Image: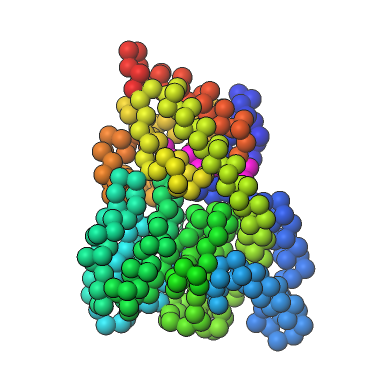
Amino acid sequence: MDEENRAGAPFCYLDHAATSPLRPEVEETVLRVFREEWGNPSSLHSLGARARRVLEEARAFLQGTLGASRVIFTSGATEANNLAVRGRIQGKRPCRVLALATEHSSVLETLKAMEKEGHRVTLLPVDREGVLRMEELENALGPSVRLLCLLGANNETGTIQPLEKVVPLAREKAPNAWIHVDWVQGYGRSRFDLDSLDVDSASISGHKLGAPQGIGALALRKRDGLQPCLTGGGQEEGARAGTENLPGAAGLAKAAEKAFENAREEWERLEALRRDLLSGLEDRAGETRLNGPREGGLPHILNVSFPGVPGEVLLHHLEKENVYVGTGAACSGKRKGGSHVLAAMGTPPWAAASALRFSLGYTTTPAEIDRILEVLPPILERLRGPGRKG
Ligand code: PMP
């Protein structure tokens, strides 16, 4: 990637929630495993044993970071979410499922498929900041609920759910529910312990924390409880067939190690940068609307609307300045119909249509925040036309 574009503008990447660049230490680990540990972990000879050791070391490390008794490697969080949902209810007697209305599409679309099998899905409403409405949850819970999906940290707005309140209530009112948390955007940023939170499974994804795309995992609190989605050679103790992505698994563990090394300081650093970005935009960008929490959410995600200018138009104008941001979830960026997350939060359509998601990460510097604040206001003024500040 060029550090400067044709106009010589400095490179400014604020789309870490879509994907983070590879960490140098991860690149080193991945290349070493590609070169030196290319055996098949299932082979019975010594090359297989070496590969297996690399795989199990990565697994053990991740288990420790999540308070899990088992980690199943997958191709990413989409597959991990599919494994949690399908592994729990697919082909079983029709049951009730609860999930947040703001869930990632890998959960929502999988639940749609499960509805076709006869399962009844209720999407739980959220408030203006994206936080689950507790009364509605309480009313929906019951013994017929077999699965409760909770997007622990939202990828579009940074909203964090109060799991320490939600999970005990769910355990009390829905004792047969499997509780699954998508922790993709929170992993490596703050402590998340399946055992102490009393959560059954959690999904994580490598490329959100500086590991390669195409590796992720489903972490389990207990060893059993899910049927496999992929069948074949019986890898991952039968939970997910297919030769393991060994460089990816080692890379994911290395990325997690680096992220947890200074997670608290990094949280504070990003929170301060996010705060500067938000107050700078509110000062200089004319009319704005914050979508999501002002404080208390993820430190690296900021979703703001700029009324009067379509988000996608703004994104491409920023790109000409070598500034990269998102309009919402990268995986639905090409899909028509606006953000289901912003709609569920009651965001008016005009505001949702002009939303940008700025997402920060380990490479983000104060200079990048300054750069956004320098280039965005004149672009907005130009696009909004004379006489219109917002
Ligand atoms: N859940 C969340 C919250 C995400 O942000 C993403 C990535 N956009 C996923 C799941 C899917 O992860 P992956 O890209 O590894 O399939």
Looking at the picture, how far across and down is residue 318, in whole percent? 49, 30
Query: Residue 141 colored magenta?
Result: no
- Residue situated in front as seen by the camera: 274 or 44: 274
Is residue 289 rendered to the left or right of residue 49?
left
Is-magenta flag for residue 361? yes
Instruction: Tell whether 301 sits left or right of 130.
Output: right
Q: Is residue 243 visible?
A: yes
Residue 105 picture quarter: bottom left
Image point (36%, 63%), residue name: 166
Question: From the image, which quarter does the C terminus lie in?
Answer: top left
Q: Quadrant of residue 371?
A: top right
- Left or right side of 183 for 44: right
Q: In this image, 149 relative to 194: left or right?
A: left
x, y (%) of residue 154?
A: 42, 52
Depicted 183 relative to depicted 56: above or below: above
Task: Name which residue lies at 40% across and 77% down.
Answer: 87
* Range drawn in magenta: 356-363
- Please identify the quadrant where the N terminus is shown: top right
**Residue 83 visible, this orientation:** no
* Extreme residue toward the bottom, this view: 44
Q: Residue furthest top?
A: 387
Residue at (35% x, 18% y) in the render: 389
Q: Position of residue 377 (x, y in %)?
A: 45, 22
List x then y, in percent, for residue 51.
71, 75
Q: Residue at x 64, y 64 (%)?
A: 253
